[in-house]
Amino acid sequence: MLLDIDNLSLTITANGLVNPILDTVSLSVDAGEVVGLVGESGSGKSTTARAVLRLYPHTAAVEGSITVGGTEVLSASRDELHRVRSSEAAMIHQDPRAALNPVRRIGDSLTERLVHVLGVSRSDAAAAGLELLAAVGIRQPEERMRQYPHELSGGMLQRVVIAAALTGQPKLLLADEATSALDVTTQAEVLAILRDLQVQRGLGVLLITHDLHLAAAYCDRVYVMYRGRIVEELRGNDLFHGAQHEYTRRLLSAVPAIGHLPNSESRAS
């Protein structure tokens, strides 16, 4: 199993108060599999993804187990954690503009991990950056490498962020609302690229999303999270018709359907 989270509980202490965030969360992702994690905002989805890389406040108290590629993350040494973060798993963030340094060129963002973390020469790192930009569907990659983030569209920046996540050749991708800021057409293009790369490289993907239709169409399996707990696991194509838990059904019933939007008749007239 590429990713195995077992009975993960996490609390954060702030201002003398203990706040429970995650409660006995268990989920898994295998190589070559896309697994969705859905739920309303504040349910703990992003915290779960960050915990995989041990990215949580120092005031957090954590129990349970997180294994990435056979390495127990929660008890990993500094060197082991460095290896997991640099070459085993990578995160694709929701806002590409926030994920990229606005005063660094695109080429710098793509090559710095290769040069400073993995010890690749600058010439080889530049060649790898060009190859990755081409792989995520960016034309004229040589020109893009010299540009700054503000010179690229949101869709192109999201492709750059995906390319940057792939520089360490990770086996696991943690995609945290990676396409939610994009328009529908660009979202479909980026997801198609991500799927092609996932198939070609045999990646495991944990896709965090609030878009239930996307989860049903794109994911092999889907976990439903509510108030820090996993309440149901379904196959992607069973999400809309096989839900058993009351919360999942309520979540699905809240999804707007075309033709049933409020005041649609009055707007049409």
Image (spheres, helix red, strand yellow):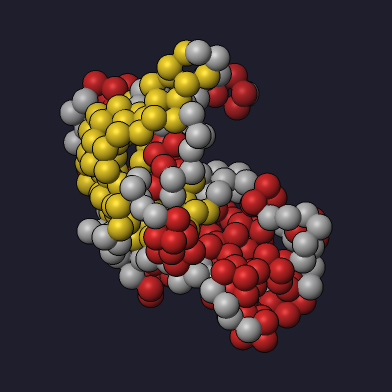
On the image, which quarter does residue 39 sit in?
top left
Image-based side of 37 in relation to 99, left or right: left
**Residue 137 image position (x, y, % from top left):** 58, 71
**Residue 265 image position (x, y, % from top left):** 55, 22
Relative vertical location of residue 194 with respect to residue 207 in this rendering, above or below: below
For this orientation, the residue located farthest to the top is: 16
Query: Relative to the observer, which residue lies in front, 40 or 146?
Result: 146
Relative vertical location of residue 240 with respect to residue 103 in this rendering, above or below: above
Residue at 35 percent of width and 45 percent of height: 74
Query: If the image is split into quadrants, where does the C terminus sit?
Result: top right
Q: Is residue 145 visible?
A: yes
Query: Relative to the observer, which residue lies in front, 85 or 16?
Result: 16
**Residue 212 image position (x, y, % from top left):** 39, 38
On the image, which quarter does residue 40 sit in?
top left
Residue at 22 percent of width and 58 percent of height: 1
Residue at 30 percent of width and 58 percent of height: 71
Query: Relative to the observer, which residue lies in front, 44 or 55?
Result: 55
Relative vertical location of residue 161 with respect to residue 134 in this rendering, above or below: above
Image-based side of 261 in relation to 45, left or right: right
Q: Is residue 136 visible?
A: no
Query: Relative to the observer, which residue lies in front, 222 or 165?
Result: 165
Residue at 69 percent of width and 77 percent of height: 141
**Residue 7 image position (x, y, % from top left):** 24, 36
How many numbered tags mark residues here? 0
